[in-house]
Image (spheres, rainbow, N blue to C red):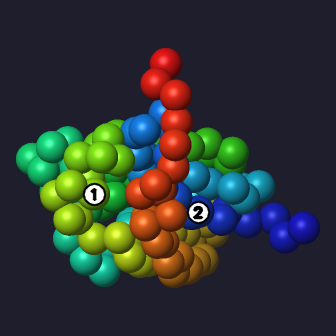
């Protein structure tokens, strides 16, 4: 296994709620993490531009095996507003020596549209 940071962005479905998570799945810290989304999308009842949150602009330090997540919206509200279902995230970050890394992750949120769940 390569010893380096490895940062991903994932959409998480839990009990009818959608979250966006930034996670360092690598074995080393990531620094200056920046996420760019290919399309604008809103959360929290359509009131917040998610790509513009500071969380996605600059995380100075993200330790290995650490995750930061934020509530996007209920899945029902998100899909009712006809927000984008296909979202691409491009993540750039650095290791402690200053080496730059980048990856692109494609997401299809339509897979969450018809999931049945039991409210807690």
Q: Is residue 52 above or below residue 93?
A: above
- Residue at the image position 81 percent from the left and 65 percent from the top: 3
Identify which residue, 75 or 47, lies in the foreground. 75
> Pointer 2: residues within 10 angstroms few (<14), some, or many (20+)?
many
Residue 66 falls in image quadrant:
top right
Residue 118 seen in the current view: yes
Identify the residue at the far right of this view. Answer: 1
Report how far apart the C-alphas of labels 2 and 1 lie in the structure.
27 Å
At 35% from the left edge and 70% from the top edge, which residue is drawn? 85
Disc on res. 79: 1
Would you identify the image quadrant in which residue 87 lies? bottom left
Residue labelled with disc 2: 7
* Image location of residue 100, percent across then percent down: 55, 78
- In percent of width and height, residue 16 lies at 43, 38
Residue in view at x 52 percent, y 43 percent: 116
Left/right placement of residue 105 relative to residue 27 reads: left
Q: How would you rate the neighbour count of disc 1 (Cα within 10 Å): few for under 14, some for 14-19, many for 20 or more?
A: some
């Amino acid at each position: 296994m390569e010893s380096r940071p490895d940062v991903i962005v994932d959409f998480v479905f839990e009990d009818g709620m959608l979250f966006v998570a930034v996670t360092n799945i690598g074995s080393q810290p990531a620094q200056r993490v920046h996420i760019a989304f290919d399309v604008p999308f809103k959360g929290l009842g359509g009131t917040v531009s998610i790509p513009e949150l500071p969380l996605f602009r600059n995380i100075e330090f993200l330790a290995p095996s650490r995750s930061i997540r934020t509530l996007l919206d209920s899945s029902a509200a998100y899909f009712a507003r006809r927000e984008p279902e296909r979202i691409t995230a491009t993540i750039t970050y650095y290791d402690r020596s200053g080496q730059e890394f980048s990856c692109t992750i494609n997401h299809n949120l339509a897979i969450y549209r018809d999931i049945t769940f039991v409210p807690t």
